Amino acid sequence: MAAARAAGATVFLVPAKNCYEAASDTPQGLRLVKVETLGQAVDALHAMTAGRRRQVANAGGCVQL
């Protein structure tokens, strides 16, 4: 995640099972997005590019779009 943030990423897709662990070491300015399937990952990317950023808080510091 640190390399992604250093490269300019502001969003990082995280498998649902890893949200808690990932949230414990998230670089400043990087938002974690919880996904369980490849379809959810694609949907999240489409939602972000379309400007739809409705967020629902989830355990572990991840958000679900």
Image (tube, grey):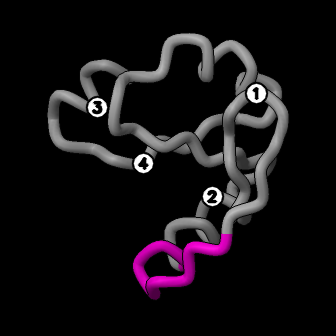
Label 1, secondary structure: give it. Answer: helix
How far apart marks 2 and 4 lie (CA) works out to 12 Å
Range of residues picked out in magenta: 47-54
Q: Residue at x 60, y 66 (%)?
A: 44
- Select label 2 or label 1 by which is in front: 1
Image quadrant of residue 6? top left
Label 3, secondary structure: give it. Answer: helix
First-in-chain label (3 vs 2): 3
Q: Residue 14 at x, y = what percent? A: 62, 36
- Residue at label 4? 11
- Select label 1 or label 3 by which is in front: 1
How far apart marks 1 and 3 lie (CA) works out to 20 Å
How far apart marks 3 and 2 lie (CA) works out to 17 Å
Quarter of the image with the N terminus in it: top left
Q: Is residue 25 left or right of residue 56?
A: left
- Label count reads 4
Q: Do the residues labelled 3 and 4 touch (CB within 8 Å)?
A: no
- Binning the other alpha carbons within 10 Å of mark 4 as few (below 14), some (14 to 19) or many (20 upward) gives some
- Residue at label 3? 4
How far apart marks 1 and 4 lie (CA) works out to 16 Å
Residue type indicated by callout 1: Gly
- Residue at label 1? 60
Q: Residue 47 at x, y = what percent? A: 56, 78
Residue type indicated by callout 4: Val
Q: Which residue is drawn at 51% across and 67% down?
A: 45
